[in-house]
Amino acid sequence: MTVVLGCGDRDEAVGPVGEGTSITIPLNKTAASEIASAELVITGEGFTSVTQELIVSGDIISGVVESILPGLNRTFTMNAYDADNVLVYSGSTTVDIADGEQAQVSINLIPVDAPFAPEIVSHELPDDTFMDLMRVPAGDYTRGSGDHPDPIQVVYVSEFYMGKREVTFSQVVRWLADRGNHEYPVGALDGADFPAGAAFLDFGFVSNANSGEVPTAIDGRSILPAANKPVVSVHWLAASEYCKWAGLRLPTEAEWEKAARGIDARIFPWGDAKVDTSRANYGNHFGLRDVGSFLSGVSPYGVLDMAGSVREWVADWFETGHYYASDNIDPTGPERGFGNPKVIRGGDYKSGPGELPTFRRDHRDFLSGDNNIGFRCARN
């Protein structure tokens, strides 16, 4: 199926003049039965990406494409999704749009192969509870943003399993109880103010006399309001120690991005559709929510909350420009980052949409713990 946007005149061509270009795309019988929603994503060097949501009605896709700034290498990608928001058709093309001129854009929509069926494994923890892990099969994927210092690269990652959800406050409390600790983090017990001042193996602890027992309250306050929220203010060493206790480890940065991005170089875990509050906890809309609350934001491998919620520690040290020097098979970070920062990924509940793409990188000192940083575990 071929989609032609514009045919050279002011009213129907994609270009820098006019208020917008109306498009109407007829669908064949098969496509009409499969497609429930569609979008047009326009990207280009030095150009802010535009995502146009299109209307699907019967056997017609329609919409208005905004005027596009002229320039080289303007890429038009059309994605069509079924009723479960699974990508079923996609196509793209790249054109140059000269200043003051129109451009004809032809996109060939191709059926997308059946998506990978997520596979879940229940991993038993030492305290006799379980953690859900999602299988990520071995293979190539595209990482990086394409902007310096993070070039687009195709890398190979061996099969691994990724935590379906971020590690919660109650899981950390059970770990500390299993270790016989007399101290527990208390900042996380403040209900709606959960993130404020919460600290984990760093500051803000109180004594608990019942060593070895899992408490239901600490210092007279119930842990239940915070039990299923992601634990925050976690420095990297503590996150790593928890994963070791669990018989797991922190994911590498390459593993984290593949689990979030899949093999189709998507911008967000759910695809290229724009961010909204059904898919991610971001922009201070909700504060911190229970893990797994945003099912529409699931990644191709069934992993939740990889955009928004809390930023997540990964195993790698951070170094600007390291992508240029790294291997393309199971890449890891440098031996030690300058200034001792570790990589964090994923954006958080306070982030704007621009901080949520699957390729977005950040870093913190490995002994710092902010109220928007948590973690999840992985294993081979």
Image (cartoon, rainbow, N blue to C red):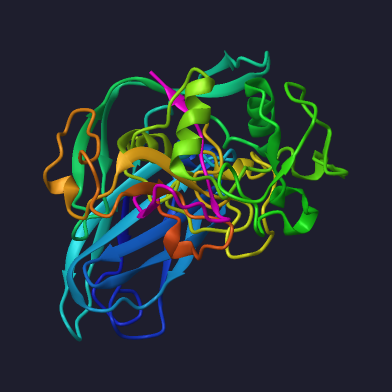
Quadrant of the image for the N terminus? top left
Residue 224: horizontal and vertical position, in percent? 81, 39
- From the viewer's side, name the closer residue of 174 and 374: 174
Q: Quadrant of residue 178?
A: top right
Q: Which residues are magenta?
A: 358-380
Q: Quadrant of residue 192?
A: bottom right
- From the viewer's side, name the closer residue of 85 and 194: 194
Apparent side of residue 16 relative to residue 170 in the rendered image (left or right):
left
Residue 26: horizontal and vertical position, in percent? 44, 53
Q: Is residue 379 above or below residue 96?
A: above
Q: Is residue 7 above or below residue 310?
A: below
Direction left: furthest residue: 325
Residue 365 in magenta stretch:
yes
Task: Tell me the residue at 67%/23% (across/down).
Answer: 180
Q: Main secondary structure of the magenta part?
A: loop
- From the viewer's side, name the closer residue of 196 and 22: 196
Residue 160: horizontal and vertical position, in percent? 38, 21
Quadrant of the image for the C terminus? top left
Task: Tell me the residue at 58%/38% (across/down).
Answer: 84
Residue 227: horizontal and vertical position, in percent? 74, 38
Task: Tell me the residue at 15%/78% (across/down).
Answer: 98
